[in-house]
Image: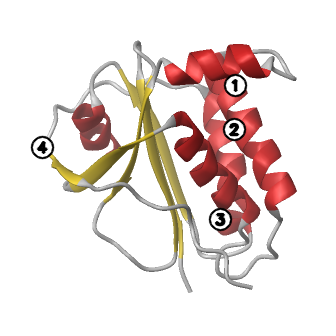
Amino acid sequence: MESPPPPFPDLSTVPPGRRRDPIRDARLRDAFYDLVSVWIDRSNGRFDFSGVVGDLADSLTTLGVPRAAAGVVSPAGAVAHMAWAAASGGAYAMRRGYAFGRFAAWWTVSVLAGLDWPPDPGTLGRILAGWRWWVWTDGSTSGWQLRLAVDTGDVTWVVSASDSV
C-alpha cells in the first residue's frame, strides 16, 4: 500500500539562529514521541524534540540542525502530517492505520494546547489557528520523516523524526 505524506508547501531557507536554553516538557515530548514511536522502537528511527523561547531559526539551531528550509502550513496541514506519521509503520514496523494516526495527532495537539481530553473541537481549533506552524527539512530525502515546528507565542517547539531502510 502506498501512503505518501501530505503535500509540502514551498520551502524557504531558514537563516542560522541563536542557540538558546532548551525548555523541557516531558508530557509534550512523550506526545510527539508517541506519533513515531514504532519508527524508533521497531525500526531504525531517530527522534529529537525541543522548545525554546525564540523563533524558528533559534529552535532549529538549539536542536542542532545546521541548515534547514521551512514552509508555513495551516493547523490542518500540521495535524495531517502528524496523523500520517502516526499511521505509518516506518521502514519495518506494522502500519498502525489512519484511525490511530488521527487519534494520536488529536492527542498531541490537545497536550500542546493544554486542554483536557477529549478537547472541545471549537476551542482546540481556535487555539491552533492562533499559532504559526511549519514543516521543515534538513535536506535529507530518504525514508519516513516528520519535521514540524510550531510557535505558540511563548515557545517555539520543534520535532525531528525519521526512519529509513
- Drawn side of residue 106 relative to residue 143, left or right: right
Q: For residue 26, what is the image quadrant?
A: top right
As measured in the structure, the alpha-carbon distance from the residue carrying label 2 to the one carrying label 1 is 7 Å
- Drawn side of residue 71 relative to residue 39, left or right: left
| Type of the residue with mark 2 | Ala
Q: Which residue is mark 2?
A: 31
| Type of the residue with mark 4 | Pro
Q: Which residue is mark 1?
A: 111
Q: Which residue is mark 4?
A: 15
Q: Circle 4 — which element? A: loop
Marks 2 and 1 close (CB-CB < 8 Å): yes
Crowd rating for badge 4 (residues with CA inside 10 Å; few <14, some 14–19, many 20+): some
The location of residue 27, given as percent across then percent down, is: 68, 28
Q: Which residue is mark 3?
A: 40
Crowd rating for badge 3 (residues with CA inside 10 Å; few <14, some 14–19, many 20+): some
| Type of the residue with mark 3 | Ile
> Between tags 1 and 3, which lies in front?
1
Q: Earlier in the sequence, mark 1 or mark 3?
A: 3
Marking on residue 19: none
User: Of 73 and 37, which appears nearest the observer?
Assistant: 73
The residue depicted at 66 percent of the width and 74 percent of the height is: 90
Q: Earlier in the sequence, mark 2 or mark 4?
A: 4
Q: Earlier in the sequence, mark 2 or mark 3?
A: 2
Figure check: 27 above or below 67: above
As measured in the structure, the alpha-carbon distance from the residue carrying label 2 to the one carrying label 3 is 14 Å
The residue depicted at 77 percent of the width and 48 percent of the height is: 102
